[in-house]
Image (cartoon, grey):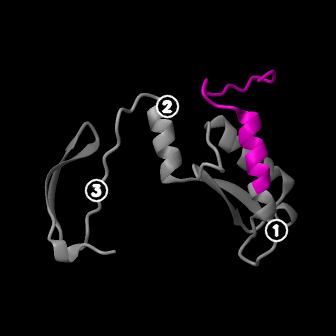
Amino acid sequence: EKFGLSFPADYNPANALNGAYLILKETVDRNKQPVLNTCTKTSIANCLMDMVTQGLSMQKKQCYPIAYGQTLTCQISYHGYKAMAHRYGAKSIIAEVIYDGDEFKYHIEDGRKVIDEHKQDFMNMQK
């Protein structure tokens, strides 16, 4: 914070970084090598910076460290997007899966898809 970073009021970056460190110690790349050994220090720092500036926690499964070659990235999960939406005023998030064979109609309103009708046959649903 003394260097100009700001964090959400309900977020403790020190706790998030300590938790992320424990997760990073056990995270491996696709070759089963520890990401702390194979990824660049700059990409690890950027991954952690992405996490804290967005007010997310790896321990809460709001984001995941994913290695692409020697670059570690911070991949936001559904839980992370949901946490950020609630933090900035969303009251509820309602989601439904549309399965192959379902019938639905929608229209676009202010650049967003609004579902008008969704008919779902029980036999279309997958486990």
Give amino acid for label 3.
Glu
Q: In the drawing, what numbered circle is on residue 87?
A: 2
Query: Which residue has dot 3 on it?
Result: 96
Residue count near mark 1 (Cα–Cα under 10 Å), binned few <14, some 14–19, many ≥20: some
Quarter of the image where one finds residue 2: top right
Count of numbered badges drawn on the protein: 3
Quarter of the image where one finds residue 5: top right
Q: Earlier in the sequence, mark 2 or mark 1?
A: 1
Q: Residue at x 29, y 41 (%)?
A: 111
Which span is picked out in magenta? 1-22
Left/right of residue 16 with respect to residue 35 in the rendered view:
left
Query: Which residue has dot 1 on it?
Result: 34
Q: CA distance from mark 1 to mark 3?
A: 37 Å
* Residue 89, percent from left and from top: 42, 28
Q: Residue at x 25, y 72 (%)?
A: 125
Q: Earlier in the sequence, mark 3 or mark 2?
A: 2
